[in-house]
Amino acid sequence: MKKYKDYNPRKKEITPLKEAFEELLQAYKLKDRFNEKKIVSAWAEMMGNSIASRTSSIYAKNKQLYVKLSAGPIKKELMMNKSKVLQIIEDKFGKGAIEDIHFL
């Protein structure tokens, strides 16, 4: 076993917690799911109180965001401005975090 004596999968240098957390998410392939949860929790902050108060449920799955709204006119307005909503999400969370939005 002397051949493998120096093998140690741990890094020897100190890394910041943020970098270590990002590496952990990528290692376990959880980065996309983590981003989806962050987008769902930040919906009210991104869209404002008027839209957030009329959102009955929101969830993300496979880079698709599903938003159920209780007001028809707001749903129609958001459907017409889907690219603008996607741009807001992209600015805050980076390109590719969400590929499409479905308003229900």
Image (cartoon, rainbow, N blue to C red):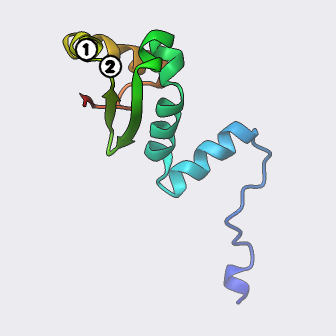
The percent coordinates of residue 41 (x first, y second) are: 53, 31
Of 1 and 81, nearer the camera is 81
Is residue 17 found left or right of 46 in the rendered image?
Answer: right
> Type of residue at label 1?
Ser
- Give the position of the N terminus as an image quadrant: bottom right
Residue at 19% x, 11% y: name it: 80
The percent coordinates of residue 58 (x first, y second) are: 40, 34
From the image, tell me which residue sits under label 1.
Answer: 83
**Badge 2 density bin: few <14, some 14–19, many ≥20, Cα 10 Å:** some
Q: Secondary structure at mark 1?
A: helix
Circles 2, 1 touching at the beta carbon (< 8 Å) = yes
Is residue 14 found left or right of 21 in the rendered image?
Answer: right
From the image, tell me which residue sits under label 2.
Answer: 86
Marks 2/1: CA–CA distance: 5 Å
Q: Residue furthest bottom?
A: 1
Q: Quadrant of residue 97?
A: top left
Q: Secondary structure at mark 2?
A: helix
Of 56 and 13, nearer the camera is 56
Above/below status of 30 relative to 102: below
Of 49 and 25, nearer the camera is 49
The percent coordinates of residue 75 (x first, y second) are: 26, 18
> Type of residue at label 2?
Leu
